[in-house]
Amino acid sequence: MRDHFELRHADAAGRIGELTVPRAGVTVETPALMPVINPNIETIPPVQLETEFGAQVLITNSYIIRSTPDLRERALDEGLHSMLDFSGAIVTDSGSFQLAEYGEIDVTTPEIIEFQYDIGSDVGTPVDIPTPPDVSREQAERDLATTEEALADAEAVDTGEMLVNAPVQGSTYPDLRERAARAAYDTDLDVFPVGAVVPLMNSYRYAEMIDVVAAAKRGLGADAPVHLFGAGHPMMFALAVAAGCDLFDSAAYALYARDDRYLTVRGTEHLDELEYLPCECPVCARHAPDDLRACDDAERERRLAEHNLHVSYGELRRVKQAIRRGNLLELVESRARGHPAMLDGYRALLDHAAALERSDPVSKDAFFYLSAESARRPEVRRHHARLDRLPVSGDVLLTEGKGGSDTYDHVWRVVPPFGPHPRELSDAYPLTAETPDRVDRAAQESAARGVARLVDANPDATVTLAHDDWDASALALVPDSVTLRNRVVDS
Amino acid sequence: MRDHFELRHADAAGRIGELTVPRAGVTVETPALMPVINPNIETIPPVQLETEFGAQVLITNSYIIRSTPDLRERALDEGLHSMLDFSGAIVTDSGSFQLAEYGEIDVTTPEIIEFQYDIGSDVGTPVDIPTPPDVSREQAERDLATTEEALADAEAVDTGEMLVNAPVQGSTYPDLRERAARAAYDTDLDVFPVGAVVPLMNSYRYAEMIDVVAAAKRGLGADAPVHLFGAGHPMMFALAVAAGCDLFDSAAYALYARDDRYLTVRGTEHLDELEYLPCECPVCARHAPDDLRACDDAERERRLAEHNLHVSYGELRRVKQAIRRGNLLELVESRARGHPAMLDGYRALLDHAAALERSDPVSKDAFFYLSAESARRPEVRRHHARLDRLPVSGDVLLTEGKGGSDTYDHVWRVVPPFGPHPRELSDAYPLTAETPDRVDRAAQESAARGVARLVDANPDATVTLAHDDWDASALALVPDSVTLRNRVVDS
């Protein structure tokens, strides 16, 4: 049990947690965003991140600090918190990115971990190998062996109260990601970055990103805080949190601003192409696009970075509120409509519905049926599994209608996408679902699968299904032994 | 031609327009939100609406002013603009709401129109009958006759430069709405409120609201500015604009705030139930929910009203930016996932795809396939119609693959949801569509309908379809004369 991470609330595989960072003396509420601070270029001062945006944690690069004589001296002399003027938790990266980018770096894991400790980092990082997507399996395995050595090296250093990252690599091989996660979890390291997913995100391969995260989660205990390394675009926060990610780092807020790019929860816009500022943040409520275009470069970059941070922190608040209300997947439904690749990501997430179901609360506020995808949600799967444990016998009417009947031994309701259930469950989640009047066949088919499951579990019952004009594709899924009545045609 | 309303940009049936309001000497850009000012209760001062939120127009109630001696005297004496301290356009309502609510009012259309003129209103309103949904057809027709008399009475008054509203009623009878709209459009009145839809919105009957708007639009010329009377919730702005609405009025921002209700583009929250403020507006970026709960009643109401206005104006900017980019229906896709009833509204909008197609630009930036609903968009319909005018003969291969072939006279591409097209169109909108890798059967079925349409138009061609493992439901729509090849199974 990792006692520095406590789970408070869950929804799908998403959770609100508390990460205790003993060296900083702070508790970080997750999901959390860690703005990336380039120690050489200050876009938004850390103190402003803390006071204006409520940042509890940031991330900076110890390799750059170590390689820059001025910074190195100041960091060793006064410590990171004083140097950056930030009282929250400070995570330090190790130079792995530089290693991947330039082929070699002049520091070993024990050296960089000790340096991180010496400058007062709160969460250190070993030198892992960020294996990119699509490499050969041999390379992925070879790199993984090196990463596992780095984790062992890090474990061997006495780091006092400093937490240490245990990165999970494995390229686009789910089984390697799962194995790597299991090995990382078996160390006594503390935080689990899923690494080298940036190339997937940059090329909008969100479905594969979700498969990588799901594989890592299979190898990690529920008490493992998971950092989706390099993920800072607010359009995918809801999706990634629903898959079980707790920590994000954003260099995007600053890098995009430098390039006049403007983050939104539905994608990225370029300032040049905006006739209106499609946002309500303090920057966008006060300015028109022309105001920003008229600013000098530094001022424009600062304002765009502020906008990018506002929308990122705003989205995290929406995500956390959704977890509290139990409608995180409803938020993901909206976000999935930002880009076809996000829809792929959501569809991939639903491939892992069985895993989501394990952490998903049994009762929540309300279930909204919002698309054909909703029929594949974990709540539907759970209801179908429950049908095996709801025995029924004799003459049974399953009906979409509300009335009872004297001619049957039992009258159960049928609600797409869930399927049949005894009336006493009608007031219980998720059967209180709000569904559209224009029901789609995906919901009907899912309800039909529920009917089939009930018939399967109760072979002696004589079942009649009174449906509201279901699609032929749904009726084809109802077992032949069931008598069909179309309530719309009959009435 | 109504020369006080000019259309600048269009997307689906949505448009950006300029409403010239001569009496105020201002031009209002639509879609526009008119905050409702209760002359007896000031939540946010009009001058703040103008300077902080950029309000170009507001609406207040001339009947309340006329019935309140103090207000009446001041309004007649100094004029509405001075009394309210607002330099933009001021629209005045007539007391129709009070008539509907209390059964009678003590003023006629000529009297209230003259009063509105006298107090300096920029857009006046006759006393129409806001017939609620679901009344008998007889009542709806009787009420409509009275409304038409009111319009004739208003037309007869000399109102100088003041514009006058011509409300469109007809309850939930689409044919009556269409007839009423045609009659209103045939007057020389200026702005066309679609009336009495509030009960539909309050009970989340968005599909019927869309049907009512679509019916009214059929009776109105494209140059008619349309006001969705009583619609002020930002969750439905995108949907209503896509259906052709130009003006909204919001009493919600203030009324909801009084009740601790908090507007979002995905629905309404209650302050008591918020653990986080799920928004990036200046109020929510600066405060936590507990800060707001700790305020005294007036302060809390003011801040919530400010939040409600920020999110309303922010959403209108998003809607306008989407019209400029040609991705308004992509925004509607997101908003449709806020509530199952919004999904019904979007599905209803797509029932009117033929009407949307008439104003929809032939070329836009990109088409995003975001759900099974996307297959029903007007662009898909237009491509299918175009297939009738793209003759092809001989041996024709329709393929989802990119390569050519020597064995066929013609090789065309097939892209779900559009269907077949000659390669030279591949770089043209909408065939440049971004689609998910996980294609759904709705897209395949729509593409299959395109294949059928092509075969129908070219009965002499010999057609082979090389598809990527389409669903049986899609293949069933391909004519029997077409030879099928499954590229996934073959490869």
Image (tube, coloured by chain):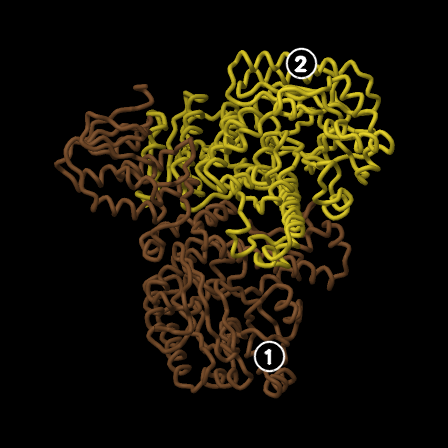
Chain colours: A yellow, B brown
Can residue B475 be seen?
yes
Give the structural element (helix, strand or loop) at label 2: helix
Q: Which mark is residue B81?
A: 1
Residue A274 position in % (x across, y down): 52, 53
* Residue B246, position as x, y percentages in the image: 45, 63
How packed is label 2: few (under 14 Cα within 10 Å), some, or many (20 or more)?
many
* Residue closer to the observer: B163 or B116: B163
- In front here: B196 or A185? A185
The local crowd at label 1, few if under 14, some if 14 to 19, many if 20 or more residues have their Cα within 10 Å, is some
Q: Quadrant of residue B256?
A: bottom right
Q: Chain of mark 1?
A: B
- Work out whether B165 lies above or below A239: below
Q: What is the quadrant of the C terminus of chain B in the image?
A: top left
Query: Where does label 2 land, which residue?
Result: A148
CA gap between label 2 and label 1 equals 73 Å
What residue type is disc 2 on?
Glu
Q: Is residue A419 above or below residue B32?
A: above
Q: Quadrant of residue B34?
A: bottom right
Q: Quadrant of the N terminus of chain B?
A: bottom left
Name the mark nearer the viewer: 2 or 1. 2
Amino acid type indicated by mark 1: His
Give left or right: position of B125 versus A234: left
The answer to whether residue B341 is left or right of residue A50 is left
What percent of the width, then of the height, locates residue B142?
36, 73
* Count of numbered badges drawn on the protein: 2
